[in-house]
Image (cartoon, rainbow, N blue to C red):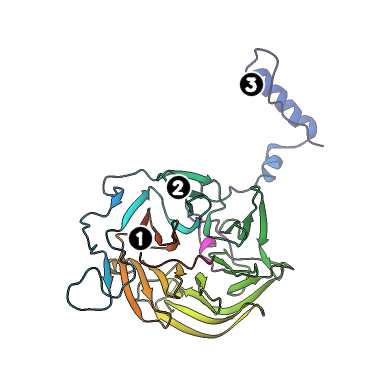
Amino acid sequence: MTTRLPITTGAGEPVLARRTLLKGAAAVAATGMSIGAAGAASVAPLGQTGAPTMSTAPLPLGPLPGSRYPDAHLESAKKGPPTFGPPGFPAFAGTMAVERVATGFRWAEGPVYFAAGRYLLFSDIPNNRIMRFSEDDGHLSVYRQPSMNSNGNTIDREGRLITCEHSGRRVTRTELDGSITVIADKFNGKRLNSPNDAVVTADGAIWFSDPAYGIGGFYEGIKAEPEQEKKNVYRVDPKSGEVKVVADDFVEPNGITISPDEKKLYVCETGFTDGPDNPSHIRVFDLDVAGGKVSNSKVFAEMPKPSITDGIRCDTEGRVWCSVGWGDPNEDGVRCYTPSGDLLGKIHIPETVANLCFGGQQRNRLYICGSTSLYAVYTSVQGAMKP
């Protein structure tokens, strides 16, 4: 039996008075427990927590420097004579420009929009926190810290937050009362690597990617050896909770989304980060929601190496919007493809881009997580708003 160390004293006696410390030492001695034994019961911190990045002059909020209508940060793949905005590229919405709406993060990822509250949640992975950006007044606040070095976030059909955690090595759901439910943390009795991104289909199944980035060091998680032999894409059954592998041939599966009709599953392959001969592209599968499986994998779009695409979302017409970063600075930003894989255009961002999502009351505002900042741009399309 362990005797508690006293944490309060008699009236007027300071908590850390000499008498208190002596009593505490005696209590430890009486139990026969050494200081070393007590320390052995401690646990590691829940990932890297905290040293916020200070705001600097080169990162002002508002429209990007040099912006004018039409915004030159929007580039159409269709070349032709000057026109009112980039021809054939649905990122153009008229009198608008790419804006930096928040800054001061170490690595921003995983945005998800909650229409009921008009706010965006996104992860600041190294600072071990989930941030909240309120769209109505531009207020920025901390939603959760520690967040277990959360990465990808999404929302299910009941309005609940689904989060992939690096240091937790799990997928969780935040219930409507604020409690947290562990959705998946093991497969075949072994811990997952570090879940990265997730999507929810209409039947409530959760599909998620599980690369090893979060266990590679102590900056974005807790360094550890992988227990899974492969880096898989998984499905969690909405009724039984069974975790099943749906794709096991990725080098590093990353961002994930579904088409508006739920007939296609898109997964970003970022294996290039592990070696120059590995792929950097988006793969697409035929999706069988009822059967809980995928088939007919093929490459949807190649990325210009050394760049990779990390995050991906669809609009209501099935166009695919994805992030680009880590390579040529001229490629940093967002790309938009037709459902058949043809490039429509690019949105240039002055930082490496990780993830994106559609938001706003009309689902026509594209939010972009770019390294240290959050960007936004109004488009002429609406996001599918499938989680």
At mark 3, the secondary structure is: loop
**Going by the image, does 79 lie left or right of 203?**
left
Q: Position of residue 184 (x, y in %)?
A: 66, 63
Q: Amino acid at mark 1?
A: Tyr
Q: Is residue 50 visible?
A: no
Identify the mark nearer the N-term, 2 or 1: 2
Question: Does residue 285 lie above or below 50 as drawn?
Answer: below
Residue ID for mark 2: 134
In the image, farthest residue toward the bottom:
296
Which residue has dot 3 on it?
15
- Classify 10 Å Cα crowding around label 3: few (below 14), some (14-19), many (20 and above): some
Q: Are marks 2 and 1 in contact (CB under 8 Å)?
A: no
Residue 73 coordinates in the image, percent (x, y)? 26, 64
Name the residue at 63% across, 19% down: 17
Question: Where is the C terminus found, in terms of image quarters?
Answer: bottom right
Q: Amino acid at mark 3?
A: Val
Q: Nearer the viewer, residue 60 or 125?
A: 60
Magenta part, dominant SS: loop
* Place of residue 222 in the rendered image (x, y in percent of width and height, measured from the top left): 55, 56
Range covered by the magenta-colored residues: 209-225
How far, Cα to Cα, is label 3 from label 2? 41 Å
| Amino acid beneath label 2 | Ser
